[in-house]
Amino acid sequence: MTTSTASDAREEAAAKRRRAAAQRVRDARDRLTSTSGTRPAFDYELMRMFAQNRLSASLVVLLLVATVGFLSSLWTGAATAGVWTAAVLLIHAVMVTKCRQFLATPPAEIKIKAWRIRFLMLDLFFGLSWMFILVQPLGVAEGTGTFMLFVMLLVVAVSSMLAYSLPIAVFAATVPVTGAVAVNFLFGGTLHDYILAIMAVASQGYFLLLAHRLYSSALQMLQARAEKDMLIGELEQAKAISDEARHRAEAANISKSRFLAQMSHELRTPLNAILGFSEVMKNEIFGRHTVTAYKEYSNDIHDSGQHLLGLINEILDLSRIEAGRYELNEEAISLCGVVEDCHRLMKMRARNRKITIHEMFEPDLPRVWADERAMRQICLNLLANAVKFTPQGGEIWIKVGWTASGGQYFSVKDTGPGIPEDEIPVVLASFGQGSNAIKSAEQGAGLGLPIAKSLVDLHGGTFTLKSKLRVGTEVIVALPPERVMAALAPLAEPSPTLQPKETPLPIVPFDKRDGATTKGAAA
């Protein structure tokens, strides 16, 4: 057992190492084939997010350009502001068109590297256009530094939020603007201008860091979604494999049931003839045998036929139970009566082996709701096993009584050789036999206990097997309290009577002239 557990642990660890190695190789291959150091599928998803962000914020950028163009016309002139506004709107229109074209193109036809360069150049032109409008106010009017810093912060913030999925595009759109504003402030030569230049550079670093955090979050989200998709794919594949295996198992079960049904018919038909003719020969109905050995042979043939018929019935019962086709014909029965009948059937066999059977029944036990044939088969199987494995001169105790929870039980205890603890699961399995059964001269098919346990499970009860070597074996069958008739709830309404009410017969006066007829009618 320890060797098997260690072997399973080593195989599991080796499988984990193989999966980890395959994952590392796959990641390395994806990094080599990617243009950004991530998986190729992630490159497309990141660029798709970039295009969607640009399209969703197109109206906001349009309003921003129009507002800054109008305000800048106050010190640069209407012509200059108009030319700048038209140029920025043209770049913005080209950006929106390219984004729509990217989203409309099938993923298989997209060249990631070419589209990245296009988006990068458009963002660079967008940043340069803002740089030109911000360096114009230099020396035109006093107090424009605050306006320049405000516009720079606004442009950098918007560009960082829209282009975070392409980090290099964030640099192309924001660095020209921040650099121009910072240089413009440095040329001012005053302490106030120096402070504004430092604030511009610091804000650029902050927004770059924020864009990097957003990019990392988007990458983690894509990785999580890819792992989820991979897990869903594995689950679907496992479900398909399990469904296929289930269909094969159901087909095999149907084939087995058909085979057993056909074979039982094919076996029972000649077996009935064998049993019938052997019984005729055994009982010497048509005359005595001239050779005495013929009668003994007839007895052997009949006994073998009975054994074979019992084996066929057990196999069929087990197959019906395993297929879920065994139907219980439940009724109110006396557990003591069923056990007593089984004891009466096995008494002759036990007496031949000089085995004493003791009964210990609790008095006044109510009836239980169960299948009488199934309970009788359980009890007979347990008693047959006890008689088979108990040595000559041994004893068997049969008990029927209450359980601690309010149910009823019956148990069969013998003084046989016992079953080793590690063989108990074996004897409870179909066709399983312990070492003592193999050594016994009366070997069976190993179906008695499995059938008994399955029938107890169908009743919702418990089947307990206790055994100790050279001491004996005890089997306890317990039914739940719900099956005890005294524990059943009374009916909410009285059941209607099945017999119609008797209507009183009319009284006919007696007429002496026609007495017979009148009496007959009255009767």
Image (spheres, grey):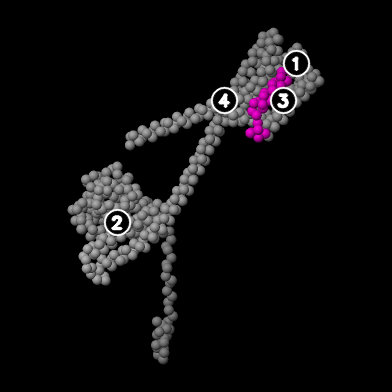
Residue 44, picture quadrant:
top right
Q: Which residues are magenta?
A: 105-132
Q: Is residue 505 above or below residue 324?
A: below
Q: N-terminal of the two: label 3 or label 1?
A: 3
Task: Identify the residue position indicated by label 4 in the image.
Answer: 32
Mark 3–mark 1 CB contact (< 8 Å): no
Task: Identify the residue position indicated by label 1 in the image.
Answer: 136
Report the Cα–Cα distance between label 1 and label 2: 108 Å
Q: N-terminal of the two: label 1 or label 4?
A: 4
> In the image shown, does 370 or 444 lie closer to the viewer?
444
- Looking at the rendered image, the disc whose residue lies closer to the viewer, 2 or 4, is 4
Report the Cα–Cα distance between label 4 and label 3: 41 Å
Q: Is residue 32 above or below residue 230?
A: above
- Looking at the rendered image, the disc whose residue lies closer to the viewer, 4 or 3, is 4
Instruction: Report the residue at 64% width, 18% height from top.
Output: 204
Which amino acid type corresponds to the residue marked 3 in the rendered image? Leu
**Magenta run includes residue 107:** yes
Relative image position of residue 140 (x, y in whole percent)? 77, 13
Q: N-terminal of the two: label 2 or label 4?
A: 4
Report the Cα–Cα distance between label 1 and label 4: 45 Å
| Farthest residue, direction bottom | 513
Relative image position of residue 38 (x, y in whole percent)? 57, 26
Q: N-terminal of the two: label 4 or label 3?
A: 4
The answer to whether residue 472 of the structure is visible from this angle is no
Task: Identify the residue position indicated by label 3 in the image.
Answer: 64
> In the image shown, does 440 or 71 lie closer to the viewer?
440
Relative image position of residue 264 (x, y in whole percent)? 38, 58
